[in-house]
């Protein structure tokens, strides 16, 4: 059904900015889930008559950062605009936003799908606005909390370049990751600090014109985004196949029924009677500001991934896993800088270190393992001074309480036994004590080698050098064949 139509999708993403204070007043930005209602409010964000807003410089800094990271042109001359509408969560009766002149325009973001295909999604605009209060509907009435009123909000609007629910998800995931890299948004979607609205339409394949779109409001998980979009595409295709026409409307996503439902029909664009905000002067972003903001950008996740695959030979999967979180990526970078071999370090981090951190509830921020100590441990494995199993034990202690790997190895008596004569003596003893197993092995049951290795490891209390044990066992068993 869907192959007759081409999906056309554009995303609007709203991100609260992690500033200390609100967009236009000095009230603190508080956690809207845990803070007591209406405790971070003042006459400005309550919309009292005669109160004057003042622009939060840090919020503009954050917006410039995001716009630059998304490859946008930065508008040097910004005008705030009033978007007029009435709603109980909007005490002023208008929202201060940006209309004709957003901070950023004409950007682009490359997203890679799980299969490896990459596509470029245009960024139409990045602009600043203020969040509204929060309504809670109870039987018999509604409660309103204005703590969120006036919190700086960034809106990132894509071009309608997205072609599937999966691509929408990949795009939104990348945006969230970049916001976290830039330290402007926590990405805590369950707290509502990042909200996604896909605009969705279908057109006959080969056609250039856009079909009528519907908009899904306020999705707060990637799963809801992918599933809601797919549901909507299938629903629209059925409408079109049945000879009907799609109605332009906003729809909600029902998370338990897993379907969309109509909320509000808007046949025509709403008239918000935008006009230039008379209480604010134009916001000028001078060239020095832009240069400083660009210089302060961290290496972005796409660049990290490319460096990990191209310069360090990691797989795309390993690169993405290490670059996912900026703190982890920077820790990995420090490991490389301390002389760690990228592939080996990546393996140990993704397998053993992550598992240990999970088990012990540690994040990279409170990990007592220094990159240098980690590299020292890997060096001892590589140099044959400690075997893999013992190194894992050492790493576990390091994750718990830090420490120097050499000291832990010595204290626990974990030095690898690589003394060839000593190992040969142990192996000869095992061979002499197990004539049946030897006969079976020589009779063709090659898998018994693993059993012999196990015996030797046990005899060395887990510290034997596995590679050496393997070689010695083979040699000495084969010697029996010719004897
Ligand atoms: P608004 O929803 O406020 O009218 P826009 O018209 O700028 O704002 O569009 C919002 C989003 O909808 C953008 O991401 C844009 O790419 C996307 N969009 C516009 N037209 C369509 C369409 N026909 N189908 C799907 N997405 C669309
Ligand atoms: Zn206030
Ligand atoms: Mg919209």
Image: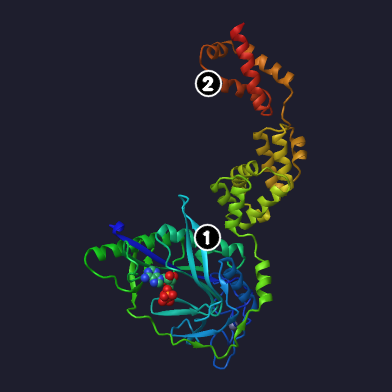
Q: Secondary structure at mark 2?
A: loop
Residue beneath the point at 55% across and 64% down: 187
Residue beneath the point at 64% across and 59% down: 299
Query: In which quadrant is the N terminus drawn?
Result: bottom left
Look at the numbered discs 2 and 1 and tell me whether their residues touch, using CB distance below 8 Å: no
Is 132 rendered above or below residue 458? Answer: below
Residue 305: percent from the left, percent from the top? Answer: 58, 53
Q: Name the foreground residue: 139 vs 121.
A: 121
The quarter of the picture where residue 63 lies is bottom right
Count residues near mark 2 (Cα–Cα under 10 Å), then give few for <14, some for 14-19, many for 20+. Answer: few
- Whether residue 217 is visible, yes or no, is no
In the rendering, which numbered label is found on residue 447?
A: 2
Q: Foreground mark, 2 or 1?
A: 1
Q: Secondary structure at mark 1?
A: helix
Q: Give the mark, 2 or 1, whose residue is nearer the N terminus.
A: 1
Colour style of the rendered protein structure: rainbow
Q: In the drawing, does residue 265 fall left or right of residue 324?
A: left
Residue beneath the point at 54% across and 47% down: 317
In the rendering, which numbered label is found on residue 387?
A: none
Q: Residue furthest top?
A: 483
Residue beneath the point at 58% across and 67% down: 185
Query: In which quadrant is the C terminus drawn?
Result: top right
Count residues near mark 1 (Cα–Cα under 10 Å), then give few for <14, some for 14-19, many for 20+. Answer: some
Residue 428: percent from the left, percent from the top? Answer: 67, 14
Task: Report the residue marked by disc 1.
Answer: 174
């Amino acid at each position: 059904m869907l192959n007759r139509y081409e999906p056309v999708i554009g995303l609007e993403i709203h991100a609260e900015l992690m500033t200390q204070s609100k967009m236009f007043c000095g009230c603190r930005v508080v956690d809207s889930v845990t803070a007591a209602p209406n405790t971070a409010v003042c006459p400005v964000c309550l919309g009292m008559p005669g109160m004057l807003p003042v622009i939060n410089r840090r919020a503009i800094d954050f917006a410039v950062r995001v716009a630059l990271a998304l490859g946008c042109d930065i508008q040097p001359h910004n005008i705030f605009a009033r978007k007029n509408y009435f709603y109980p969560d909007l005490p002023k009766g208008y929202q201060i936003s940006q209309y004709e002149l957003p901070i950023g325009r004409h950007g682009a973001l490359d997203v890679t799908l799980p299969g490896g295909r990459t596509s470029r999604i245009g960024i139409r605009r990045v602009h600043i606005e203020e969040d509204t209060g929060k309504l809670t509907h109870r039987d018999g009435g509604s409660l309103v909390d204005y703590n969120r009123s006036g919190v700086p909000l960034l809106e990132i609007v894509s071009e309608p370049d997205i072609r599937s629910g999966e691509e929408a998800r990949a795009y939104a995931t990348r945006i969230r990751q970049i916001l976290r890299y830039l330290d402007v948004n926590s990405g805590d979607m369950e707290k509502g600090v990042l909200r996604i609205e896909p605009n969705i339409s279908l057109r006959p394949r080969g056609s250039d014109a856009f079909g009528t779109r519907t908009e899904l409001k306020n999705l707060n998980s990637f799963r809801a985004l992918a599933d809601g979009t797919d549901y909507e595409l299938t629903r629209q295709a059925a409408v079109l196949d049945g000879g009907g026409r799609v109605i332009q409307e906003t729809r909600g996503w029902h998370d338990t029924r897993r379907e969309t439902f109509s909320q509000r029909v808007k046949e025509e664009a709403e008239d918000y009677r935008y006009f230039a905000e008379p209480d604010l002067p134009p916001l000028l972003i001078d060239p020095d500001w832009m240069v400083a903001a660009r210089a302060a950008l961290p290496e972005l996740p796409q660049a990290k991934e490319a460096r990990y695959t191209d310069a360090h030979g990691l797989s795309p999967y390993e690169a993405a896993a290490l670059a996912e979180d900026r703190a982890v990526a920077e820790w990995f970078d420090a490991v490389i800088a301390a002389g760690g071999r990228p592939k080996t370090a990546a393996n140990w981090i993704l397998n053993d270190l992550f598992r240990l951190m999970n088990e012990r509830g540690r994040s990279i921020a409170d990990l007592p393992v220094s990159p240098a100590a980690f590299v020292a441990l890997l060096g001892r494995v590589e140099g044959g001074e400690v075997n893999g199993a013992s190194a894992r034990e050492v790493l576990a202690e390091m994750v718990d309480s830090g420490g120097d790997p050499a000291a832990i190895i010595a204290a626990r008596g974990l030095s690898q036994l690589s003394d060839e004569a000593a190992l040969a003596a142990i192996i000869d003893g095992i061979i002499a004590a197990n004539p049946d197993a030897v006969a079976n092995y020589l009779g063709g049951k090659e898998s018994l080698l693993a059993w012999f290795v196990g015996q030797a490891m046990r005899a060395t209390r887990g510290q034997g050098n596995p590679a050496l044990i393997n070689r010695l066992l083979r040699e000495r068993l084969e010697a029996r064949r010719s004897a």
